[in-house]
């Protein structure tokens, strides 16, 4: 038997650049200048620091830089190195690039640890090869990779869900195995939720706006419920996959937040406590590679680190574009159904297409459309997990992927048509709560922008790539078309978006198809367009998000706040919260300040309950300041009242705050930067209210636009439209076709008087509310037999209602013009005042009609 020769390298390269040039199997003669610059800066300034971030935008050769640093550290310092990717697809993709492009011999791990190859595991343990694996291989309760010297986190901008998931106990309302736990938690929370919110939590809703409902159980309430909730989790998580996460949280429940939504319930800390995970904490060197460094401290919030040293991209490189994109916004000219139809026609012309959707439900809907109308083979993300070959070798194929805005690349001729359906805004309940309820979306600006950049860049990975990007979904269209937001993109993308917007206004289906064919031909006509975009880009300047320096300055205190809570040092957490508040001064940070006033009050509350009663006054003060900043959040009003003096008057109209949230969402769904969808919807209402045959549907749509849960049903004895609020419901009888000279008959009177009972029997969300019947009619007289039935019915004369409705539409249009986007707490406060002043809230409508009992008004 022959002895084995040593595989250890005799000569160790001085730096990663020299290492790359020594690799005999590499497919590139040398590295690109910006890659060399960032590698040299890393060796000079960051190689000995604990936490380091490298900014490497799309198309900059990020994978090569990361793998070279990994291999160099393995060889030079004799380290065990783990390279983390968000998904298994990216593990396979990175491993393939390491071998076929760069001549690096690494090992990949994508299965469960029990099935790892002994040979590969030994290669990693001995420090002979770099390990490439997914986040979940490290962030679990019993990681195989628990002894790494260096950890490289690829696509760190996408890390929040992958890292935080280790400490996020998610109870899925639709998962059959979770339903007993969900039911038990819902029962415990019921006394602390409104009737409407409880019905949303348990799934008794059918409104699209309720599908995105989210809220938070206040920390003082969680403290009161801690023992009960702990017992529920103990009983229901044993012998389930949730048991592992619960084992990490059970001793730290007061350091967590409990979020509730129509999709489920989540218990998690604000910041992932990565310091408590030895496999991550004990590494001597951690590198975070990202398309953005998160200048406002977002990278630290994502990873739970106090300080991360940044090695920026070489000057000027971040201003360059990557490839060329032709943006198409069909929603600016056509209704949704026609946009869907056009997408299918363009897919047919393109041959291969990639479709990115925000949810599994929307993905399934698009798959069904494709399978119904086209002969294309449909691939999911799982179908191309290990290889794209089946997709790229087919002439007619569509890859439809839900929630995968980053990940698999389709460069060169692999795909020329990318469809992005919907804005990848919030990826979990915590993000949704902070954005939509607290108005703290400012801290997510870069995170959202990066997700969008990742999404629209799936098919343009290098300078020579080109792809059409078909944008659907009002919120994404608004985001990309809004000049106020576009200024934060790099110049070439601004120019691409300018061109795409201009080409999408007042277009029909044939126009879009003709432009798409010209783009695919990529001939002289498209070359002139490309020149136009390049010239336009030279006139653009990239601006940076507001208040980013203040956010960056306080992020270390945010992490220390979470550390203090984790160790039950509630007074220490309160002190850190005060430090944070002292640093948040910009007006753009109003919502974020409100959040930290609430968190400071919660920390003081917990400290006072653990013996430090001197902080009781701070509880009142902080909750009061939080409430003043976000007066439309009902439970904050209740908290400030409970902790304040007993004679504190709560004058907030909670029905109106709920109405405003729904109004905001409805306007965002219609789109706020382009008039098309909104104007069409408004026109239907205005025209419909003037014709008896269309009055009922227009009346129902008016209720939706005003922010009510409005509906109507065509069945025996059913009412006309109903408008449901938080505590009251108006049910209408539309008598718009009657003549002024006619009399209201007994049968019609009996019918309208019976509507409340019909609502209780048939509409679950209205069953426990105050239900008020209203008759809309031009008549001024009633038959004698009708009067006894009209004692509890309000009369709203038709002409008065039509005048009121026209004014309402004018007010809503004006409000819409100032709406910047979801979670705008300044807009919500303005809307609260304006709707109140113009008699457009549920309570004021009913107050206005209280003296209009139909029996008294009709002769």
Image: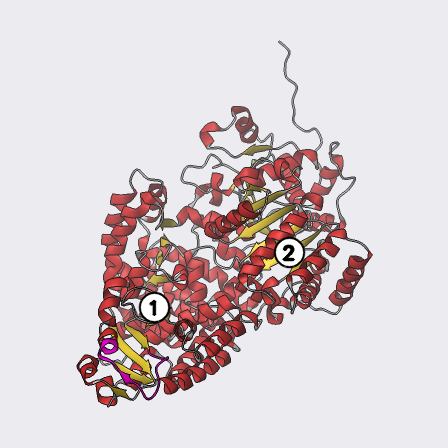
* Residue ID at (26%, 85%): 850
Residue 640 percent across, percent down from the top left: 30, 73
- Is 179 above or below relative to 649? above
Of helix, strand and loop, which one carries label 1? helix
Residue 506 percent across, percent down from the top left: 65, 69
Q: Is residue 551 left or right of residue 457?
A: left
Of helix, strand and loop, which one carries label 2? strand
Residue 783 percent across, percent down from the top left: 22, 84
Counting every numbered tag in the picture gives 2
Q: Is residue 26 visible?
A: yes
Residue 92 percent across, percent down from the top left: 59, 37
Eye-nearest disc, 2 or 1 = 2
- Is 248 above or below relative to 534? above
Q: Name the residue under label 1.
A: 601
In this picture the colour scheme is secondary structure
Asked where in the image residue 334 lies, by quadrant, the reply is: bottom right
Q: Which of marks 2 and 1 is nearer the N terminus?
A: 2
Q: Is residue 465 left or right of residue 757?
A: right
Asked where in the image residue 218 lies, by quadrant, the reply is: bottom left
What is the CA distance from the residue labelled 2 to the residue labelled 1?
46 Å
Q: Mark 2 points at which residue?
A: 469
Q: Can residue 626 be seen in this view?
A: no
Q: Which mark is residue 331?
A: none
| Residue bounds of the magenta highlight | 735-749
Q: From the image, which quarter does the N terminus lie in?
A: top right
Q: Which of 540 and 733 is in front in this view?
A: 733
């Amino acid at each position: 038997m022959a002895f084995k020769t040593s595989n250890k390298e005799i000569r160790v390269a001085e730096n990663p650049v020299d290492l790359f040039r020594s690799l005999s199997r590499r497919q590139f003669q040398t590295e690109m200048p910006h890659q060399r610059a960032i590698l040299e800066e890393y060796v000079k300034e960051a190689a000995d620091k604990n936490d380091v971030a490298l900014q490497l935008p799309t198309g900059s050769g990020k994978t090569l830089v990361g793998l070279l640093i990994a291999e160099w550290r393995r060889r030079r310092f004799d380290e065990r190195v783990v390279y983390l990717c968000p998904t298994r697809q990216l593990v396979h993709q990175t491993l393939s690039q390491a071998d076929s492009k760069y001549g690096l011999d690494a090992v990949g791990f994508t299965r469960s640890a029990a099935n790892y190859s002994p040979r590969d595991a030994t290669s990693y343990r001995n420090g002979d090869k770099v390990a490439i694996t997914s986040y979940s291989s490290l962030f679990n309760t019993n990681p195989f990779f628990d002894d790494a010297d260096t950890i490289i986190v690829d696509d760190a901008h996408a890390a929040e869900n992958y890292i935080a998931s280790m400490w996020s106990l998610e109870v899925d309302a639709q998962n059959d195995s979770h339903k007993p736990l969900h039911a038990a938690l819902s029962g415990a929370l019921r006394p602390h939720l409104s009737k409407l919110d409880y019905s949303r939590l348990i799934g008794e809703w059918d409104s699209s706006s309720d599908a995105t409902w989210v809220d938070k159980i206040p920390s003082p309430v969680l403290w009161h419920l801690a023992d009960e909730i702990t017992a529920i989790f103990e009983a229901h998580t044993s012998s389930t996959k949730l048991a592992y996460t619960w084992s990490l949280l059970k001793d730290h429940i007061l350091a967590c937040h409990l979020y509730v939504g129509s999709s489920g319930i989540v218990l998690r800390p604000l910041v992932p406590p990565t310091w408590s995970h030895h496999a991550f904490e004990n590494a001597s060197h951690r590198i975070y590679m990202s398309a953005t460094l998160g200048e406002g401290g977002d990278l630290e919030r994502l990873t739970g680190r106090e300080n991360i040293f940044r090695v920026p991209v070489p000057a000027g490189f971040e201003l360059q574009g990557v490839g060329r994109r032709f943006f198409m916004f069909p929603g600016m000219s056509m209704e949704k159904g026609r946009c869907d139809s056009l997408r299918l026609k363009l897919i047919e012309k393109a041959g291969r297409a990639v479709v990115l959707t925000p949810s599994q439900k929307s993905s399934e809907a698009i798959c069904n459309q494709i399978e119904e109308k086209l002969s294309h083979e449909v691939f999911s993300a799982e179908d191309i997990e290990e290889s794209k070959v089946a997709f790229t070798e087919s002439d007619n194929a569509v890859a439809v992927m839900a929630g995968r805005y980053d990940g698999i690349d389709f460069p060169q001729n692999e795909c020329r048509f990318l469809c992005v359906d919907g804005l990848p805004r919030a990826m979990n309940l915590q993000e949704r709560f902070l954005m939509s309820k607290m108005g703290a979306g400012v801290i997510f600006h870069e995170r959202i922008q990066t997700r969008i950049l990742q999404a629209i860049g799936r098919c343009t990975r290098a300078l020579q790539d080109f792809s059409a990007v078909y944008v659907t979904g009002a919120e994404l269209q608004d985001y990309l078309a809004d000049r106020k937001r576009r200024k934060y993109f790099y110049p070439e993308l601004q120019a691409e978006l300018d061109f795409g917007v201009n080409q999408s206004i007042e277009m029909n289906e044939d126009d879009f198809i003709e432009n798409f064919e010209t783009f695919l031909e990529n001939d002289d006509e498209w070359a002139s367009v490309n020149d136009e975009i390049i010239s336009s880009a030279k006139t653009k300047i990239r601006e940076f998000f507001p208040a980013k320096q203040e956010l960056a300055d306080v992020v270390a205190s945010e992490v220390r706040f979470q550390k203090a809570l984790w160790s039950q040092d509630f007074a220490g957490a309160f002190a850190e919260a005060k430090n944070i508040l002292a640093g948040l001064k910009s007006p753009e940070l109003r919502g974020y300040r409100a959040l930290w006033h609430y968190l400071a009050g919660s920390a003081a509350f917990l400290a006072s309950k653990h013996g430090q009663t001197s902080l009781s006054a701070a509880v009142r003060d902080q909750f009061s300041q939080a409430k003043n900043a976000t007066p439309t959040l009902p439970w904050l009003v209740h908290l400030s009242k409970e902790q304040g003096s007993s004679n504190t008057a709560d004058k907030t109209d909670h029905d109106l705050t709920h109405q405003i949230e729904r109004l905001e969402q409805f306007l965002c769904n219609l789109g706020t930067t382009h008039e098309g969808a909104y104007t069409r919807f408004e026109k239907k209402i205005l025209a419909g209210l003037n014709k008896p045959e269309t009055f009922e549907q227009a009346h129902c749509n008016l209720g939706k636009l005003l922010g009510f849960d409005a509906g109507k049903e065509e069945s025996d004895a059913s009412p006309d439209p109903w408008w449901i609020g938080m505590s009251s419901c108006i049910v209408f009888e539309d008598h718009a076709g009657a003549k002024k000279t006619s009399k209201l008959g007994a049968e019609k009177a009996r019918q309208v008087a019976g509507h409340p009972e019909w609502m209780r029997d048939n509409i679950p969300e209205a069953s426990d509310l105050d239900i008020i019947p209203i008759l809309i009619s031009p008549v001024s007289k009633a038959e004698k037999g009708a009067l006894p039935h009209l004692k509890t019915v309000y009369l709203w004369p038709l002409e008065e209602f039509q005048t009121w409705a026209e004014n309402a539409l004018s007010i809503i249009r004006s409000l819409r013009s100032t709406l910047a986007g979801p979670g705008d707490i300044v807009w919500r406060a303005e809307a609260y005042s304006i709707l109140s002043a113009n008699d457009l809230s549920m309570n004021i409508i009913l107050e206005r009609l209280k003296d209009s009992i139909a029996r008294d008004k009709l002769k």
